[in-house]
């Protein structure tokens, strides 16, 4: 289980995350990404979406341990 946070101060709405993990992310009425189901796609797809975000607006945390999965501390 992951928790996903999206920084709407950064999101530019290019939908990269929606394309990569379409069952997790969707645009809201402001064309900014929101999380519709954090477990909708495999965790790998969520991390790929976070890594592909051009403005690093997506943060992924392990919901049980609180450990940050993306961005990774070791780069
Ligand atoms: S990839 Fe990043 S900038 Fe693009 S819609 Fe998703 S969160 Fe926003």
Image (spheres, grey):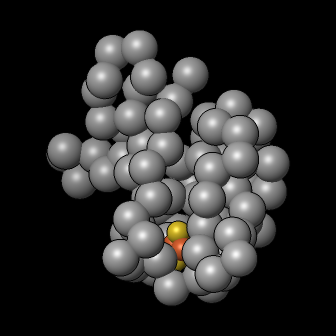
Seen in the image, is 60 located left or right of residue 16? left
Question: Residue 20: in sight, yes or no?
Answer: no
Image location of residue 59, percent across then percent down: 39, 51
Residue located farthest toward the top when viewing the structure as drawn: 64
Task: Report the residue at 41% width, 26% height from top.
Answer: 62
Seen in the image, is 67 located left or right of residue 17? left
Image location of residue 65, percent across then percent down: 33, 15
Image location of residue 7, percent across then percent down: 39, 65
In the displayed structure, 2 sits above or below 30; it is above
Task: Report the residue at 52% width, 30% height from top.
Answer: 2
Count the numbered circles shown.
0
Task: Report the residue at 43% width, 71% height from top.
Answer: 8
In the displayed structure, 44 sits above or below 51; it is above
Nearer to us in this view, 5 or 28:
28
Task: Report the residue at 47% width, 77% height from top.
Answer: 11
Regarding ligand 1, which quadrant of the image does it lie in? bottom right
Residue located farthest toward the right when viewing the structure as drawn: 23
In the displayed structure, 1 sits above or below 32; it is above
Question: Residue 11: in sight, yes or no?
Answer: yes
The quadrant the N terminus occupies is top right
Residue located farthest toward the left when viewing the structure as drawn: 74
Asked where in the image residue 69 lies, by quadrant, the reply is top left
Seen in the image, is 66 located left or right of residue 19? left
């Amino acid at each position: 289980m992951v928790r996903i946070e999206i920084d709407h101060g950064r999101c530019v709405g290019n939908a990269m995350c929606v394309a990569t993990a379409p069952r997790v992310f969707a645009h809201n009425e402001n064309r900014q990404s929101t999380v519709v189901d954090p477990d909708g796609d495999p965790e790998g797809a969520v991390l790929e979406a976070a890594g592909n975000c051009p403005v690093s607006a997506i943060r992924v945390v392990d919901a049980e341990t609180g450990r940050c999965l993306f961005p990774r501390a070791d780069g």
